[in-house]
Image: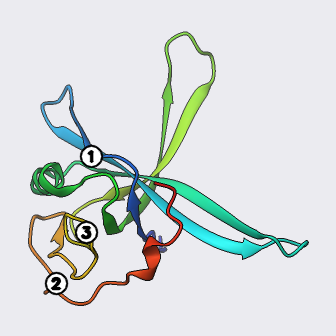
Amino acid sequence: MAFGKNHAELVGRLGADVTVNQLASGGRVANLSIATDESYFDKSGQKVDRTEWHRVVTFQDGLIDMLERHARKGRLVHAEGKLQTRRWKKDGEEGDRFSTEILIVPGHKIQFLDKPNGNGSQMQPDLDAAGDTGAAPASAPTDLDDEIPF
């Protein structure tokens, strides 16, 4: 009997506008880069800021359409999906390459937590991977804007 749960959630800023590519199969894929950050104090008492970058991918047409319209560098987003690791070979190299990313499939979503101009005063409606709109507007956290590297 198989069991387990594969669920990943991020709240962070888009590091670049969405990239949409055409697949040989005729479908499309959207790629996002999301930055999360954290601060801590090292052994000497110095504050250390650390940024982690995450790859987010979806193949869902309705979600890709929405991302093409709204996913711009610097936007604050909440992404919900599952972890997936891909393996491939690059021409001219002997070894395999690996990439771990968050895959957004039906039942998962991306939600913008700020207005397109970035003032963060209201949450935007989210769109799940099936193309349905979700949550009503509410207050968004504004303290996440501090010390973002872009």
Viewer-side residue, 20 vs 124: 124
* Quarter of the image where the C terminus is located: bottom left
Is residue 102 at least partly visible in the picture? yes
State the mark number for residue 18: 1
State left or right for residue 149 relative to residue 65: right
Residue 63 figure quarter: bottom left
Local crowd at mark 1 within 10 Å, few (<14), some, or many (≥20)?
Answer: many
**Distance Cα–Cα, label 2 vs label 1:** 22 Å
Identity, as a three-letter code, of the amino acid under mark 2: Ala
Identity, as a three-letter code, of the amino acid under mark 1: Val
Mark sitting earlier along the chain (2/3)? 3
Instruction: Determine whether the residue tagged by mark 3 lies in a helix, strand or loop.
Output: strand
* Circle nearer the viewer, 3 or 1: 1
Identity, as a three-letter code, of the amino acid under mark 3: Lys
State the mark number for residue 135: 2
* Vertical relation: 46 (above or below) 149: below
Local crowd at mark 2 within 10 Å, few (<14), some, or many (≥20)?
Answer: few
Viewer-side residue, 59 vs 65: 65
* Vertical relation: 19 (above or below) 127: above
State the mark number for residue 109: 3
* Circle nearer the viewer, 2 or 3: 2
Q: Residue at x 43, y 72 (%)?
A: 145
